[in-house]
Image: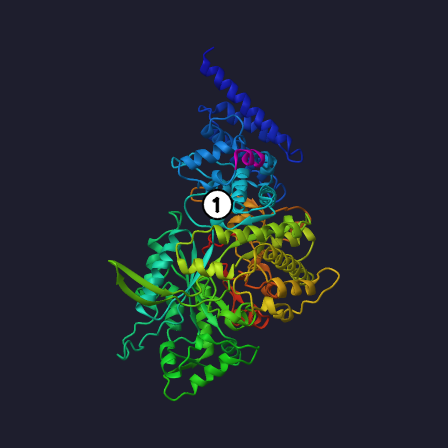
């Protein structure tokens, strides 16, 4: 018998042995037929390599996945896991898939893929101790689609695309990276962060997930720029946006300060082209400067609903009309004051202005004001002052006509997104230091903004020196709690404590290519702790989506999350110091707690928390934000964000294949609680979101799901309900006839 035949027979035996071992884990499944099919696949295979055989076994397992037998996803996952182990072992020249973490780190540092920090910050003894803490059994928590997504997008490969890293090593390296600068109990903190990640109690945002430990990319998710109304400001912003897009960031851009079409330029009347040409420029940037070669840039633009260019802005994503006025690769959003919604509801008049003319004639910027109370405040006073000024040019229209333009765009393209500026600024804990003009690409970040301006340029010693006054350039640092796992395991307090520390450390570790963003990051030390798995959790708890019980549960759970998050940031402030502009904030004065009616009870000692902040401050100026996190929730085997599911059984479509997926923990009990998003009364979703928004200091990526047959009146009622219930933002209007593109940057 030749050696090759012996090797072939041995390989057959190994594959059959692995198949038998895997099937033993699932005695409740009907596996006899599968085993017979597996034997035939293995016996007939001419190329006896795991990368040839196991994909066929995976497809065979997935073909059996149904609503009645959803656990076939775990059978498929085990085969994929074996395949990944074999690939990594072959690359690293070892028999044990989780051996020699030190060799993995040093090899990828030598390749130029990992940063030297990983081996400079930790001794060989440290690395051995952390290697011993890795638990390979945690790999069995993944569903097939979760492990497949993790392997394809996040596990580290070399420049020849060979797999080096395995799932638990990615989690450990994230933990090591984020704790690398800790001075006390560092190894224990690394282990605690690994515990949180490996148990899938939480996920970090896509940039952190992908780039932690590496020589390229940065760790933050999204950014927001405020464009100055000057040629220098516009082009400088475009350069900054390109640099951030190159590093994998999603960007929100506020255009409301830019003069409208027909405005003056240097006294010449009617020569301005308005915001559309600058949007075209950004559109080209989004297409040409992609995110690390993986996908085109993701940029959203926002404009005030009183800006004279609002109609051309709303039409910019439509699929018909003048292509010279279209920016199909941008996302758009509108900044809406309470007064506009009041005028829409009463079918009143609305007036459009040029912001440049307002500055020249009135001596102030209308966008710099907001209503301090619902129904009363500075914005409406200034707005009516502009309306009644005889020298100010204005365009009178029906408010409902603007709203019709908004809704037409939403039903055709999914956007514009809605930003309720008065509510956002009323609840801004840092209003003592600035104004919030818009939100980010995924509508969950609301932080102080201001434009960066060029002060002067001069030549000195043969060099050109540019002096800029930096504005508040918003940075989002995100991660999310897996509610379905963390709440049921009763680990929220322990989890949030380590999660806040991880997020806070991102701020000091990050290398942001735009300096004003780096300064803002350090000034406010903003983080965005969010959640996913809400529908999954409701199903596990036996709570119907369309119920008062679900609304009450959202209120109580997010209040608990808020308490632990704030308390964790306070503890960090005692250890490391408060954020630089904490003095005078709503956190420090206690106004944050009074606005939300927080009072001490048997569960939460809000009074002590307030007293602690008054004396020692809080570490992070912004704390909570709920991002879309569609990708990372798939990895963690749960439902996205605070969204309901689409279908109980569906196919995740990839470039050249489809992967069948079921709702998580689908069984005879939960199946009745997994109602499709498109069959849910959206007013219940709004009520839930209003309950949780009270406890979130920033905002929430909140989608509205409608059928393609929805009447305009019904969609208008949803928007009016969202505004009246105090939502800060709404994200996509997802129609059954329109698929919308997800933002991966904010996936957390």
Q: x, y (%) of residue 128?
A: 56, 33
Nearer the observer, 468 or 711? 468
Classed neighbour count for the residue bearing mark 1: other residues with Cα under 10 Å, few (<14), some (14–19), many (≥20): many
Q: Is residue 199 left or right of residue 53?
A: right
Q: Furthest residue to the bottom?
A: 390
- The answer to whether one can see residue 164 in this image is no
- Circle 1 residue: 212
User: Residue 598: x and y, percent?
Assistant: 67, 67
Residue 20 as seen in the image, left or right of residue 165: right
Residue 280 on image: x %, y %? 33, 63
Which is nearer the eye, 31 or 463? 463
Dot 1: element: loop
Residue 211 drawn in magenta: no
- The correct choice, above or below, for 295 with respect to 241 in the image is above
Residue under the point 45% across and 75% down? 368
Quarter assignment of residue 700 = bottom right
């Amino acid at each position: 018998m030749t050696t090759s035949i012996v090797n072939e027979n041995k390989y057959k035996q190994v594959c059959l042995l692995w198949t038998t071992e895997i099937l033993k884990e699932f005695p409740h499944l009907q596996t006899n037929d599968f085993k017979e099919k597996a034997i035939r696949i293995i016996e007939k295979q001419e190329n006896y390599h795991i990368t040839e055989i196991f994909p066929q076994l995976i497809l065979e397992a997935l073909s059996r996945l149904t609503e009645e037998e959803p656990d076939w996803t775990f059978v498929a996952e085990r085969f994929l896991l074996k395949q990944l182990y074999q690939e990594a072992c072959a690359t690293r020249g070892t028999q044990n898939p989780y051996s020699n973490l030190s060799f993995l780190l040093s090899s990828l540092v030598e390749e130029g893929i990992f940063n030297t920090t990983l081996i400079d910050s930790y001794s060989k003894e440290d690395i051995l101790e952390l290697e011993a803490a890795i638990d390979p059994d945690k790999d069995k928590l993944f569903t097939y689609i979760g492990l497949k997504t993790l392997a394809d997008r996040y596990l580290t490969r070399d420049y020849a695309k060979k797999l080096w890293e395995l799932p638990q090593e990615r989690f450990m390296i994230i933990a090591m990276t984020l704790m690398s600068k800790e001075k006390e109990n560092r190894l224990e903190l690394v282990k605690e962060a690994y515990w949180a990640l490996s148990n899938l109690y939480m996920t970090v945002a896509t940039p952190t997930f992908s780039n932690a430990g590496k020589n390229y990319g940065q760790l933050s998710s999204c950014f927001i720029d405020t464009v100055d109304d000057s040629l220098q400001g516009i082009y400088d912003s475009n350069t900054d946006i390109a640099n951030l897009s190159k590093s994998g960031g999603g960007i929100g851009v506020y255009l409301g300060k830019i003069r409208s079409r027909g405005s003056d330029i240097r006294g010449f009347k009617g020569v301005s082209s308005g915001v559309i040409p600058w949007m075209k420029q950004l559109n080209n940037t989004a297409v040409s400067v992609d995110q690390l070669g993986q996908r085109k840039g993701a940029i959203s633009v926002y404009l005030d609903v009183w800006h004279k260019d609002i109609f051309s802005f709303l039409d910019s994503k439509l699929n018909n009309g003048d292509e010279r006025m279209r920016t199909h690769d941008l996302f758009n959003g509108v900044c809406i004051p309470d007064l506009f919604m009041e005028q829409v509801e009463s079918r009143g008049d609305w007036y459009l202005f040029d912001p440049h003319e307002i500055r020249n004639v009135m001596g102030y910027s209308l966008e710099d004001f907001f209503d301090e109370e619902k129904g009363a405040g500075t914005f409406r006073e200034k707005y009516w002052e502009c309306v009644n000024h005889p020298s100010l040019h204005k365009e009178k229209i029906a408010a409902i006509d603007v709203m019709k333009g908004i809704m037409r765009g939403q039903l055709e393209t999914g956007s514009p997104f809605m930003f309720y500026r008065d509510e956002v600024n009323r609840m801004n804990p840092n209003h003592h230091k600035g104004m919030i003009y818009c939100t980010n690409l995924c509508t969950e970040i609301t932080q102080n903004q201001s434009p960066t301006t060029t002060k002067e340029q001069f030549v000195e010693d043969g060099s050109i020196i540019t002096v800029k006054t930096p504005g508040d350039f918003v940075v989002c640092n995100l991660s999310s709690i897996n509610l379905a796992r963390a709440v049921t395991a009763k680990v929220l307090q322990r989890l949030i404590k380590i999660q806040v520390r991880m997020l806070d450390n991102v701020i000091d570790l990050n290398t942001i290519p735009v300096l004003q963003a780096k300064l803002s990051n350090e000034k406010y030390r903003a983080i965005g702790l969010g959640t996913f798995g809400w529908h999954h959790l409701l199903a596990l708890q036996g709570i119907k989506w369309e119920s008062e019980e679900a609304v009450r549960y959202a209120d109580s759970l997010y209040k608990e999350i808020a308490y632990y998050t704030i308390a964790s940031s306070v503890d960090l402030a005692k250890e490391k110091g408060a954020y630089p502009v904490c003095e005078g904030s709503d956190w420090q004065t206690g106004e944050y707690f009074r606005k939300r009616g927080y009072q001490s009870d048997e569960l939460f000692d809000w009074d002590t928390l307030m007293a602690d902040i008054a004396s020692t401050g809080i570490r992070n100026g912004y704390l909570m934000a709920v991002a879309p996190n569609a990708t990372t929730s798939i990895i963690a085997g749960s439902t996205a964000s605070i969204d309901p599911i689409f279908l109980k059984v569906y196919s995740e479509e990839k470039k050249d294949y489809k992967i069948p997926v079921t709702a998580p923990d689908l069984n005879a009990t939960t199946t009745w609680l997994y109602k499709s998003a498109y069959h849910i009364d959206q007013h219940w979703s709004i009520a839930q979101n209003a309950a949780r928004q009270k406890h979130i200091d920033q905002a929430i990526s909140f989608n509205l799901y409608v059928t393609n047959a929805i009447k305009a009146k019904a969609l208008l009622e949803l928007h009016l309900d969202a505004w009246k219930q105090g939502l800060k933002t709404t994200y996509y209007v997802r129609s059954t006839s329109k698929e919308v593109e997800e933002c991966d940057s904010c996936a957390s």
